[in-house]
Image (cartoon, helix red, strand yellow):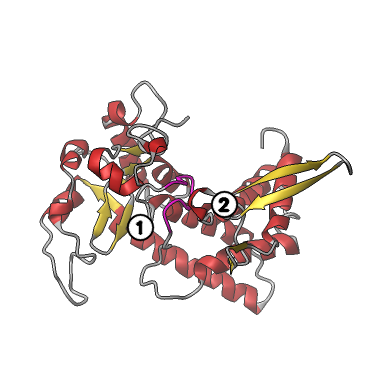
């Protein structure tokens, strides 16, 4: 809180009020629980008043609604509560409703067969096209952390409250199992994937996502140390994004999505590959950078995300 909890409290309340706005992008109404990606203050010099204008994706690059902002709001609310000891804010009707609206978007039933969240490119801190569509590690780690934070703050006064909490608990168990089983990569798992059979059917299949071993990039064999591991960028049908993403792995440690052994392995990987991931600069947001023909296809020739720049392997403080 940096000694200024009132600023944090006001931010939480202001963004909660923005959540209640009707959200439309090209005549299409967004989910009620979506939090703004950003907002700006418009000053009326004549009336001497300030007005908040929120962006729910209608002004963003690519016109993509933010998935992560709601999770960060829940995490910040928990941080405020822990830091100040003030339970009145998180227990207020407004904050309880706000949390439930955010989580309802994520816990709603649909066609998904995985507990992870299906997302579009540009829906998070990487807000430009970078090939993270599907089930990006950053969103899944934030989702897990937000669920844990919400679980500690949601009231259980009524039967409906208790049923809602039960849904959160079940999703946490399913999500943690899925991430630790299928997103985790270390030397042993890399060897297992390299020997995968394809076109397997039924519940006995080992290669459940039908990933072709030929899709393993050459750089990975040199990058993966014998000690160490990390959560890969994405797992979806016939696709594994083996890139390293710093934020997703760091949040996985902070939230205990990573087991103690996996947390240690992530730190071992960073130490073993210090020159590649850190070097003389802050930690790279992703590794390796995509370039040449792959850069053209994945980013759409984005001049801002050329190799080792911005989201494409750039160093962030």
Location of the N terminus (image quadrant): top right
Residue identified by numbered label 2: 69
Q: Nearer the viewer, residue 179 or 317?
A: 317
State if disc 1 and disc 2 touch (CB < 8 Å). Answer: no
Task: Examine the residues drawn in magenta and state their main secondary structure.
Answer: loop
Q: Quadrant of residue 159?
A: bottom right
Q: Quadrant of residue 93?
A: bottom right
Q: Nearer the viewer, mark 2 or mark 1?
A: 2
- Is 168 placed above or below 69 here? below
Q: Residue at x 42, y 36 (%)?
A: 304
Secondary structure under badge 1?
helix
Q: Answer few, some or many: residues within 10 Å of disc 1's Cα (few below 14, many 20 plus, some between 14 and 19).
A: many
Give the CA distance from mark 2 to mark 1: 21 Å
What range is drawn magenta here? 120-128
- Is 42 placed above or below 280 here? below
x and y, in percent, of residue 172 in the image: 46, 63
**Magenta includes 290?**
no
x and y, in percent, of residue 303 in the image: 39, 36
Residue 301 showing in the rendered view: yes
Q: Residue furthest right?
A: 47
x and y, in percent, of residue 235 in the image: 30, 58
Residue identified by numbered label 1: 179
Task: Using residue 5 as the reference point, say whether residue 55 is left or right of it.
Answer: left
Secondary structure under badge 2?
helix
């Amino acid at each position: 809180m940096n000694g200024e909890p009132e600023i944090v409290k006001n931010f939480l309340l202001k963004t909660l009020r923005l959540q209640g706005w009707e959200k439309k992008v090209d005549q299409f109404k967004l989910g009620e629980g979506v939090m703004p990606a950003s907002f700006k203050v418009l000053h009326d010099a004549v009336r001497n008043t300030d007005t908040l204008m929120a962006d729910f994706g209608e002004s963003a690059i690519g016109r993509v609604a933010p998935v992560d902002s709601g999770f960060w709001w829940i995490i910040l609310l928990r941080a405020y509560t822990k830091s100040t000891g003030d339970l009145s804010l998180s227990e207020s009707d407004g904050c309880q409703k706000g949390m439930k609206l955010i989580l309802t978007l994520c816990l709603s039933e649909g066609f998904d067969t995985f507990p992870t969240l299906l997302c579009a490119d540009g829906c998070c801190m990487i807000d430009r096209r970078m090939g993270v569509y599907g089930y990006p590690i950053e969103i899944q780690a934030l989702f897990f952390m937000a669920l844990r934070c919400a679980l500690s703050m949601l009231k259980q006064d009524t039967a409906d409250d208790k049923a809602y909490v039960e849904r959160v608990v079940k999703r946490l168990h399913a999500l943690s199992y899925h991430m630790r089983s299928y997103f985790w990569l270390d030397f042993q798992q890399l060897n297992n994937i390299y020997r995968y059979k394809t076109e397997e059917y039924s519940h006995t299949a080992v290669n459940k996502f039908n990933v072709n071993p030929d899709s393993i990039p050459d750089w990975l064999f040199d990058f993966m140390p014998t000690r160490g591991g990390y959560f890969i960028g994405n797992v979806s049908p016939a696709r594994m994004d083996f890139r390293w993403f710093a934020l997703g792995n760091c949040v996985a440690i902070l939230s205990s999505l990573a087991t103690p052994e996996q947390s240690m392995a992530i730190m071992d990987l960073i130490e073993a590959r210090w020159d590649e991931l850190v070097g003389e600069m802050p930690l790279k947001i992703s590794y390796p950078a995509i370039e040449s023909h792959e850069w053209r296809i994945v980013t759409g020739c984005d001049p801002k995300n050329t190799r080792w720049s911005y989201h494409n392997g750039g160093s962030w403080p």
